[in-house]
């Protein structure tokens, strides 16, 4: 992994720290990442990292948010929400901070007690809620889509499962899009079925029929 500090001394120190942190958190779990290592890669003193971000969890939160903004915002700002969601897990092992995806960074530290709530809030605020707005204010369908992406991301990027890791990107992208659209279409069909059912009246049930004898 290339040190962000190498050749980037003209970059502001805070930006170098953030770049180093993004790459560290993308490749290592939160507990395995030290501020000292991040400071060394950024070419600053560890005390400066504390002054700039307050704590390791504060730096993690800012790194997570930075990956989202560098990748073009949320589904609400995307011309094609399904393609945007698909893009969030179709990636290899990033070597540059700008190539790190939010889910890659967040899921790496999902089980840590210090970062679990941060990741939870991040996914809910920046993935589920915007997706729900795009999909007809349907939080259930949005949650199902994000759960699908999260599971795929864990299998592919965290567990490095060969069938998913070795699949060519075009095929993987097509499969993910088909799965997302299938979930959305299934929900739409269910809505149509429910709206087509006739409303029940008090006189149509078995109890009211029995009372007519």
Image (spheres, rainbow, N blue to C red):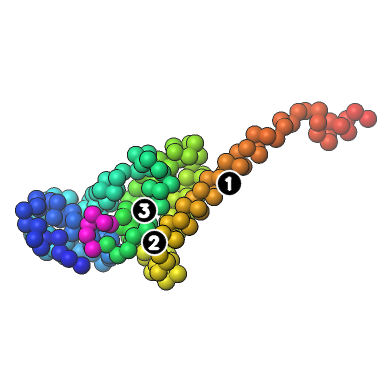
Q: Is label 3 in contact with label 2 (beta carbons under 8 Å)?
A: no
Secondary structure beneath disc 1?
A: helix
On the question of residue 84 being in view, the answer is: yes
Residue beneath disc 2: 169
Q: Earlier in the sequence, mark 3 or mark 2?
A: 3
The tag on residue 186 is: 1
Q: Any magenta on residue 97?
A: yes
Front residue of this view, candidates 164 and 113: 164
Left or right, 131 with respect to 206, comes to: left
On the question of residue 121 being in view, the answer is: no
Whole-percent x, y for residue 188 in the image: 57, 41
Secondary structure beneath disc 3?
A: loop
Q: Any magenta on residue 41?
A: no
Q: Nearer the viewer, mark 2 or mark 1?
A: 2
Magenta region: 95-100
Name the residue rendered at 90%, 28% in the picture. 212
Front residue of this view, candidates 210 and 83: 83
Q: Earlier in the sequence, mark 1 or mark 3?
A: 3
Name the quadrant of the C terminus: top right
Q: Is label 2 in contact with label 1 (beta carbons under 8 Å)?
A: no
Q: Look at the picture and state if 165 lies above or below 204.
A: below
Q: Is label 1 in contact with label 3 (beta carbons under 8 Å)?
A: no
Whole-percent x, y for residue 87 in the image: 37, 53
Residue beneath disc 3: 88
């Amino acid at each position: 992994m290339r040190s962000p500090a190498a050749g980037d001394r003209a970059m502001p120190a805070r930006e170098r720290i953030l770049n180093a942190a993004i790459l560290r958190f993308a490749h290592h779990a939160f507990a395995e990442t030290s501020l000292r290592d991040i400071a060394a890669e950024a070419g600053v003193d560890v005390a400066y990292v504390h002054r700039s971000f307050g704590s390791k969890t504060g730096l993690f939160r800012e790194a997570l948010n930075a990956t989202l903004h560098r990748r073009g915002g949320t589904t609400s700002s995307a011309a094609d929400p399904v393609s945007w969601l698909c893009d969030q897990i179709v990636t290899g092992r990033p070597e540059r901070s700008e190539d790190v995806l939010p889910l890659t960074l967040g899921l790496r530290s999902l089980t840590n007690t210090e970062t679990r709530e941060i990741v939870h809030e991040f996914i809910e605020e920046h993935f589920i809620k915007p997706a729900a707005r795009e999909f007809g204010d349907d939080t259930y369908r949005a949650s199902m889509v994000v759960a699908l992406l999260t599971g795929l991301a864990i299998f592919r990027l965290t567990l490095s499962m060969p069938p998913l890791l070795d699949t060519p990107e075009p095929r993987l992208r097509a499969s993910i899009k088909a799965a997302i659209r299938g979930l959305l279409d299934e929900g739409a069909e269910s809505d149509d079925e429910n709206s087509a059912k006739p409303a029940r009246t008090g006189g149509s049930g078995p109890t009211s029929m029995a009372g007519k004898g």
